[in-house]
Amino acid sequence: MSEGDKRQGDRWRIPLRQRLADLQKREGQVILVLALVIGALTGLAVVAFILLTERLGMRLYPVGSSAWRRVLIPVLGSLGTGYLLFRYFPNARGSGVPQTKAALFARQGVITIRTVFGKFLCTSATLASGIPLGREGPAVQVGGGIASVLGRLLGLPSEQVKGLIPVGAAAAIAAAFNTPLAAVLFALEEIMGDLHAPVMGAVVLASATSWVVLRMLLGNNPLFKVPQYQLVHPLEFAVYAVLGLAGGLVSVAFTKLLLGMRERFLRFPKKTLWFQPVAGGLLVGLMGWFVPQVLGVGYKYVGDALNGRMAINLMVLLVVLKLLAVATSYASGNAGGIFGPSLFIGAMLGGAVGALAHWLLPTYTATPGAYALVGMGAVFAGIVRAPMTSVLIIFEMTQDYAVIVPLMISNLVSLFISSRLQRQPIYEALAIQDGIHLPTAETRQRHDQHQLIRVMRTATEVLPAQLTVREALEQIRSSKFRAWPVTDRRGVVGVISLPTLQRELAEGAAKPIAELVDALTFPHVHGDHTLDQALDRMGAARLDVLPVVSRADIHKLEGVITLGDILDAYGVEPHGPALGA
């Protein structure tokens, strides 16, 4: 490069740095402008999502097409997307909501442009081929990714980039469901876990912008057209409570089935990842051969249930088939969410309960469509565990205030049942299966100055998992600790103590220490935990040394914390040997 070219390049770079510096000084204005841009871009992405999946799906397996197409297209679609996910876009698997929360809380707000593109491409192909997953969860990751990419391009610090992720998530839900208020609540209730988050203004602005883009491009059409709701008799409140009970039980069955199947798929060798999604595609195709309504998200059939145009036996059948198809499709690794399927299953369940109630008590109950509407909210609340968002989504869809009380009754009963029988929310459980430990609401609310990241130390002494008990005792002979992290090719896989090694020496000195630890449930802490939390875990595990691991990957060792470090942080002089002093 010539001297003149260098000077010309410097003339461009220096003003750009100055502009970025000026932008960072006007932080509030920058965030609001970014919210507008994020909302507009996310709205365009969601509109493209809707048009691409619906129109391509109509061409691949049009209504009345040959049965063989309903089998072949899902299989080919899952095979193609499975290869793309394995080879090019590994971070685009799954629904998108756990991955978005992981980016917010464990990955410094980073969602790459490659992941955004891969999520859009693979989810579009998956849904268009008839796999019965939803587009709303993937849209959340795409919206959060757009926000992350823009924030990092502008050179914003990681805390500000993280603050933009719920902005993109809200914009995605606003356009996907045509519900701007519910989108704001979802971003704060589910993504942030804080209804008083300081980004509320930007979230509202992005949600409104995305909604306007949707209205401009696709018109003022609600997601579902429903008749006016009417409470016929107070006895219906009892029926809605029964619907909530059924919704809670179905939610638990769905969650446990999906998590159990996914756990089994994750046990298969990594080289099988690229064709695992075919299991879901094949099952969907076989079901679609006999019951075409199983294919795709199925919002058209939800509309039929809401308007009383579906028979009770078909609705009951679709609850069972859709539950199995969605759980298998998701667990096997197809790209897609569980928002849409939860609404579908809820509508069919509610319609079936309503049809039965109306048959038994025709003069005291409304038409089945009213129960289908409330059933959507009940199952959504039981699976996603966002009850307020559930109420607001249904309210915005109907714009009918009369539906609020039945919704609240069913949602609360469903939430109570599901939280008792399946204590871990589905998104949190999915993240844990991927080795990502998201902070709980309690952890996020506690900002004690004594966080472990301030006092933890580098892990200078670790034991390779392939060592025998005798070899491990030899290696730690001169150590000042009484417990050590155990590592293999994945990273840290456990913690082993001196008493355990001494006890095992007499029984099996040649036994590898890998057999003495559990790689999934070993004692550990995270850098944002507080010292008292570390003490609690040390007491429960009866250890005075714990590994500090990444929330994004439980096997990534970031350091260790010792009892001596904790006592020193509290200003207490430790006594006795091997406290890490």
Image (cartoon, helix red, strand yellow):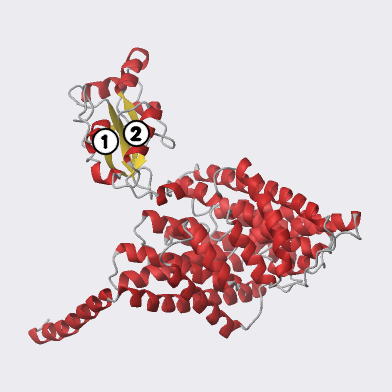
Q: Amino acid at mark 1?
A: Ile
Q: Name the residue beneath numbered marker 1.
A: 566
- Identify the image quadrant of the C terminus: top left
Q: What numbered label is drawn on residue 535?
A: 2
Residue found at x 55% / y 50%: 426
The relative height of residue 518 versus residue 341 in the rendered view (above or below) is above
Q: Is residue 61 visible?
A: no
Q: Are discs 1 and 2 less than 8 Å apart at CB?
A: yes
Residue type marked 2: Leu
Q: Looking at the rendering, which quadrant does residue 381 occupy? A: bottom right
Q: Is residue 421 above or below residue 280?
A: above
Q: Which mark is residue 389?
A: none
Q: Residue furthest left?
A: 3
Q: Is residue 398 above or below residue 547?
A: below
Task: In this rendered view, identify the residue nearer to me: 240 or 573.
Answer: 573
Q: Which residue does the image show at 67% across and 71% down from the upper left?
A: 397
Count of marks, rendered view: 2
Mark-to-mark CA distance, 1 and 2: 8 Å
Q: Give coordinates of residue 134: x percent, y percent.
A: 60, 63
The tag earlier along the polypeptide, 1 or 2, is 2
The residue lying toward the viewer, choosing from 309 and 457, is 457
Q: Secondary structure at mark 2?
A: helix
Residue 304 in the image: state x and y as whole percent. Answer: 77, 68
One can see residue 473 in this view: yes
